[in-house]
Amino acid sequence: MSEAEPIITLRGVNKTFTRGKEKLEVLNDLDLDIPKGSFEALMGPSGSGKTTLLNLIAGLDRPTKGKIDVAGKSISDLGDSELSRWRSQHIGFIFQHFNLIPVLTALENVELPLLLTKLPGPERKKRAATALRVVGLEDRMGHRPAQLSGGQEQRVGIARAIVHDPTILVADEPTGELDRHSADEILGLLTKLNQEFEKTILMVTHDPAAAERATIIRKLDKGQLV
Amino acid sequence: MNLATLAIKNIRRNRLRTVLTVLGVAVAILSFVLLRTVLDAWNTGAEHAAQDRLATWHKVTFVMPLPKRYFEDVRQVPGVKKATYINWFGAKHPTRDREFFANMAVDHETFFDVYDDMVVPPAELAAWKQDRQGAIIGASLAKQFGWKVGDEVTLNGTIYAGEWKFRISGIYTAARRSVDQAQFVFHWDYMNESLPQGRKDQIGWITTSIDDAAKGGSIGTAIDKAFDEREIQTQTMSERALNSQFIGAASAILTALDIVSVVILVIMMLILGNTIAMGVRERTREYGVLLALGFRPGHIVSFVIGESLTVGFLGGLVGLGLSYPVVQQGMGRWLEENMGSWFPYFRIPALVSVGALVIAVMLGLVAALIPAWRASKLDAVEALRRLG
């Protein structure tokens, strides 16, 4: 796996936040290659820069300095609109708090990313249903988030992340809100997506048990890989 | 589902808040429609007043009488087609004396020739002319007091003291919006013959209809000029100018109503803006998620504005829906029947209805501008972190 060509390349990446007069350097001259098809866990203490690194790779944020290439595209050079469009095509997000829209059903939540495509309504619904089937929730399509368990909500979140067939899945503490059993189910699902659907997965976690499911574990401390 | 239904689904998120906001907008629109209708009804008298009728009265004041012989002189002025004379009688219903209605002693031969916008069935008009104690009343007044043709009624005089007995000879209807349908007219002769010698043969004012409405000014001047050298001078004005002058006297009230109607809309906008801003604040993380998924700030702005426009439109519709039964059918009917002298025609103008709906939607748009602008400035990372 590690010999595969890198799908994500970071060179000399710095990220500095300014809080009032104080400058906080979160990432410091970071170089990183993530191979295509890998399942990587990113670990480290709080404030080490894990989520910031994830946000940079997902195109949610821009580096203060350095260059980021994802799937052959230099995303650090893209404008806001281009970056939004690129994200909608290449990145699938899995959040710690699931972040489903409470007024929408599971099917509608999964359909959300497809609203940005030109797919007709019936085709969008068909694809959303397929994604829910992949995560084992075909019998919960009409349920609202409040009618689902935490584990089911996160599975809907995963279905939403894969429905548009992105190149990369980024997961920020995907099991942080779940009990062990539900967490194992979610991790099993991520493994399946990595192995069967060949998705490149980058997961931030504090949980060593979750990290064990990854093919590569990287540790970050004070803005640098250790 | 599409982007529009996603925006509309947000409205159902907090149903109680949405319902209360829609009702708030509806009440504001109802109040706006009511005030604009009052203003319109008030102006109706002037706008729809006859342009070809002039009124001539004592130059000093309306309450001082003119000699009856002036009537014949006015008729001779070139351009005058018909003329009639009238006295304000000012009597009251013996038991319901707080219910005002106009009652006047009129020349039975000429009155309905000049006031041809008060329509009396020919048989009733003929009967009235034959009966010195006969009275013609408006349809609203008949309904107000339950009077019908043939009834004998008594009024208590105030300017002309005593109990005055009448028989209802006929009921008129209005052929023009400005016509007060709550008037009571009777034979001038009946009043005059009962007066002491010193008060006889005096009239309140003379109304003339003229050949050419465009020459109202010059004919009025000619009438007044005819009495320049006489013991009592006159002042002549068109009916429309007279009504406008009356409205002008109430201009402070009308201006206040005008301002209040605008203030109500501003309050409505602030309520709606606050509700939308609360919704945006509560959904910051969701907007962060949408931005992360690839939705652009323009989409978020559309959701916020779409939600506000929909609430404004729904509030406008409910407000208008309430306005017709409340303002037009309820208050309007009551006002026309009981205060016909001030509001002879109290109906919601079509322009006010359309305007209220357009204003509700436009205010929905304006109310959303600041929340939408703030939502458009959201940073996805900040939004996800803030509440996550």
Image (cartoon, rainbow, N blue to C red):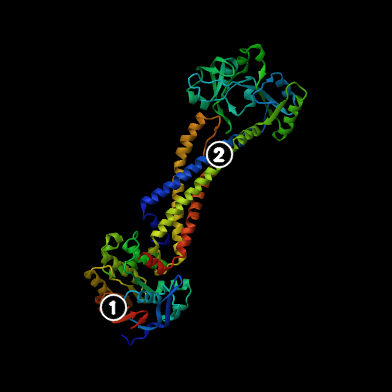
What percent of the width, then of the height, locates residue A210? 26, 75
**Residue at the limit of the structure toward the bottom, as seen here:** A3
C-alpha span from label 1 to label 2: 74 Å
Left or right of A167 on screen, residue B236: right
Q: Quadrant of the N terminus of chain A?
A: bottom left
Q: Is residue B307 above or below residue B34?
A: below
- Secondary structure beneath label 1: loop
**Residue at the limit of the structure toward the right, as seen here:** B229
Q: Which mark is residue B77?
A: none
What percent of the width, then of the height, locates residue A226? 33, 83
Which of the two residues, B125 or A145, is positioned nearer the viewer here? A145
Do the residues at discs 1 and 2 belong to one chain?
A: no
**The residue marked by circle 1 belongs to what chain?**
A
Q: Which mark is residue B39?
A: 2
Left or right of A161 on screen, residue B49: right
**The residue marked by circle 2 belongs to what chain?**
B
Q: Residue at x 39, y 68 (%)?
A: A114
Which of the two residues, A110 or B11, is positioned nearer the viewer here? B11
What percent of the width, then of the height, locates residue B302? 46, 61
**Residue at the limit of the structure toward the front, as seen here:** A21
What percent of the width, then of the height, locates residue A138? 27, 65
Residue A186 in sight = yes
Q: Is residue A17 above or below residue B37?
A: below
Residue A137 in sight = no
What residue type is disc 2 on? Leu
Tell how many labels: 2
Q: Is residue B287 above or below residue B171?
A: below
Q: Which residue is mark 1?
A: A196
